[in-house]
Amino acid sequence: MKKHIDLLRTRLLKKQIKKYEIYLMRQRGTTLEFDSGKTKTQMKADEYGFALRLIHAGRLGFSYSSEFNTASIDKTIDLALEAAVYRPVPAFDFASFAPATFNPGRDASLLEIPFQEKIELLFSLETFAKKYDPAIHLVKDLTYSDFLSQVQILNSNGLEVSFENSCASLVLSALAKKHGKEEVGMASQETVFFKDLNPENLGEEAARRALSFLGSKEISPYQGPVIFSSLVVAEMLQILLPSFFASSLVKGTSILKNKKGEKIFSSQINLVDDGLAKKRVGAAPYDAEGVPRKRTPLVTKGYVTHFLSDLFWGEKAGCESTGNAMRENLTLPPEIGFGPVSLEPGEKNKEDLIKDLGRGFIIEETIGMHMADVVSGQFSVGVSGLSVVNGKKGKPFRGGVVTSNIKEVFSKIIEVGNDLKWDSGILAPSILVSEIGIVGS
């Protein structure tokens, strides 16, 4: 990377650019996809490029390239200068260096593990799922993916930092069939280290989920307490979390605007954005602007305590960066992001929550949560799950609809479980909510 950095600096100096930020990334990885015994994808990737931000005449420009010759670099600088015309930033500046001692760890062995070993690991999911129960007659959508990223960030303020991160993941769907009825159960796992992938547990989890829905009946209208499973809680948190972004506060699109210090949620809620979480995908010593990541409490015992920011929106909101600048890829400038986020667990396991519920329903899956309105927090989703009778799991149901508000749900939490599940950057347990309406047939 050094020769490319030297050339980038030389060309920026040649064009008299005094304020700049260079983000270089090399990402190598593998993607394997199989469906019903047929290969869909077998791919190795090696991507390398840079993204450039510069400040010229009080305006911020952005561009990117995957080529490092003089002509391509000059074109990238020119495109960033053109883009700068449209984005005035009178008080914005790039990060100054601050040391970070956190090391999240990364799995360099991902590049050395034989391709065939990864394929065999993926196919073992099918073996474990079918072994769990004879009713599992098909396993599909088998997916394995991994990557190892090397990042280097430097800017005109003297900042120069580098770090690596890695991820390996598995996904599958198991189909259970009995008495002419068929149900699907999906399961996934995402880890920093390849050795932590557990295909046996994952295959069995997908099988259990599929089996649990066999014999599902439509639900009658219901109003009362329910349990939301950990994966559904993670889905709801994805809708809530943008309200903690400084950008949402400035734009007026946060349901938590002017709510800092107020008790908005149940006292059972403790929510943390932990960029320093060990062995969690998304943790890193620095964010995408070179600001050290940190542990930021968002909600403490129901009180809104902090918001998340990067340098750009922090300047507009009048707050410091919390180290939450994220890049989806090199083609986009950094934006505020979250993760790893944790809804801190309570003391009771899910079975204890079911006993405390006594009679009601467990919502295990939703359809359409991604369509929720992040500005208002309103959602209307299809739901499926299990009934609870006398403190024990009963028959499965499908076809229910829940219409509510994210803020309202999290204000009605009675208990938080300890059955943590990781999904899309969020670690969440099941929750017991005092009252929810379910529209049924």
Image (spheres, rainbow, N blue to C red):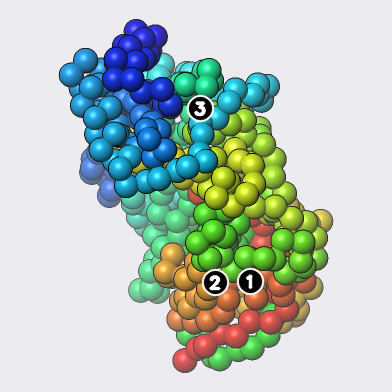
Total numbered badges shown on the rendered structure: 3
Check disc 1 and report its element: helix, strand or loop.
helix
Q: Which residue is mark 3?
A: 165
Q: Residue at x 61, y 41 (%)?
A: 321
The first of marks 1 and 2 along the sequence is: 2
Q: Quadrant of residue 95?
A: top right
Check the image and report above or below for 221 versus 145: below
What residue appears at the point 51 percent right and 31 percent down from the top-left corner?
Answer: 94
Find residue 435 and report its horizontal and vertical position in percent: 69, 82
Callout in the foreground (1, 3): 1
Whether residues under marks 2 and 3 lie with C-beta atoms below 8 angstroms apart, the answer is no
Q: Residue at x 43, y 26 (%)?
A: 19
**Mark 2 crowdedness (10 Å alpha carbons): few <14, some 14-19, many ≥20:** some
As drawn, the label of residue 258 is none
The foreground one among 349 and 89 is 89
The residue wearing badge 2 is 377
Disc 3 secondary structure class: strand
* Foreground: disc 2 or disc 3: 2
Locate the N terminus by quadrant: top left
Q: Earlier in the sequence, mark 2 or mark 3?
A: 3
Classify mark 3: residues with Cα within 10 Å, few (<14), some (14-19) or many (20+).
Answer: many
